[in-house]
Amino acid sequence: MKKSFLLLLSVVAATGAASAQNPFILDQFTADPTARVFEGKVYVYPSHDIPSPIERLKEWFCMADYHVFSSENLTDWTDHDVIVSQDRVPWVASGSYTMWAPDCAYRNGKYYFYFPAMVRDTLIGRGMMVGVAVSDKPYGAFMPQAEPIKGIYGIDPCTLIDRNGQAYIYWAGFGNLMGAKLKENMLELDGTPVVVGELPAGDKGLKEGPFVFERNGKYYFTFPWVKNSATELLAYAMGDSPLGPFTMAEEPIMDESPTGCWTNHHSIVEYKGQWYLFYHHNDLSPHFDKNRSIRVDSLTFNPDGTIQKVIPTLRGVGITDAWREIQLDRYSRLSSKGASIDFINPANTFEGWKTILSENSAYVQYNRVNFGGKESKTVKVRIFSAAEAKLLVRLGGPEGKVIAEISVPESSQWTEVSAALKSAPAGVHDLFVSLEGKGSVEIDWIKF
Ligand code: FUB
């Protein structure tokens, strides 16, 4: 493969539609997020779901390539564009669209991108195998190896370098979760793979997507598991060494998806002193759960090292600047009556969501808005309302200070309306917007 082509692929794309909220990539489907901290930023290596261009995969997973995304503040994400694609990997079956869950590791000045895919017919051991592409930078250009790693038959690779500098690779294969040492070159297994024991047996539900990490001398073996014959929850076991033995934890890291997404696939990473769980739901594709979207929420450990269950949120992580378009529909709290969320355009979910307030005092709350940096004297909302109405904007909550009253005009289309701020806020606040009196007001975003 020509180096110039790879360099072209690695050119940083302009920041796409991305946000501090969940899901955090909004201009394409993304799944199976493996987050790693490289060069002081978080890099997320997801799968890239697409609606299938071929009949055989119309109702199944379909992926042709991988993008990588990076962020310094977990609010603004840069899409570095395609780093590896099925057409450029010599061992991958052409047109198989099987670029499933990947991972990336750093060692000795190089970045190793691990990915599963269907092998060419001519290779021994047909089916899914795992290959590597190597780069000098976390965002590419990645140069794929000519052959997949010998001895790995399966999907969902995950790597770990333990406290002694030994590298491991884990994967899901034939109903089991597997592990093996990697050689110093990160390209070959060092010894025979083992079945990771002490996990629920195969007849107790599908296990896949292993993600292993170390914290305070303990190794956490985490994995999606179809425990209750429905969708996947995120389970884990703990042990003192990378290949076990492990002891299963009683509580899951995350319960089954509230949206009925069959898969969940995750990674856990510490960044600037906070731990995060990256995972996926099917937010942008509510009726087809093979087109997924990646999310992130904070994760906390108990004093004994066990993991507190993570409740999925729409608000996500990070702080939102007041002068940007604040998507209230990724709310922290909604009133129990008269407030709802819907797509702006159900025929094109990539246009995002709207908040609908349709009863006196109905409200939406959006936490952690930063009013520092730029002083604003006005508030602007993108709004749709068939009749005149009034919105109140407060800081803090329902009893908080009213900072603006917005008179909403009658309109037959989306329109932007401004109002003067009663006082200029400073610092980080929770934002609270409510309907005062009658009406039904649809809000796309608000900004200051
Ligand atoms: O994305 C395809 C497959 O779905 C992954 O490899 C699994 O972990 C599941 O998320």
Image: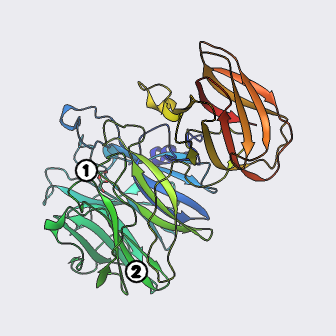
Nearest to the eye among marks 1 and 2: give it: 2
- Label 2 CA crowd tier, 10 Å (few <14, some 14–19, many 20+): many
Colouring mode (rainbow / by chain / secondary structure / one colour): rainbow
Residue that badge 2 annotates: 219
Q: Amino acid at mark 1?
A: Val
Secondary structure found at label 1: loop
- Residue 381 appears in the figure: yes
The percent coordinates of residue 72 (x first, y second) are: 63, 57
Secondary structure found at label 2: strand
Left/right of residue 261 with respect to residue 72 in the rendered view: left
The percent coordinates of residue 307 (x first, y second) are: 45, 73
- Residue 184 appears in the figure: no
Residue ID at (57%, 47%): 333
Residue ID at (17%, 67%): 204
Q: Amino acid at mark 2?
A: Tyr
Above or below for 192 versus 324: below
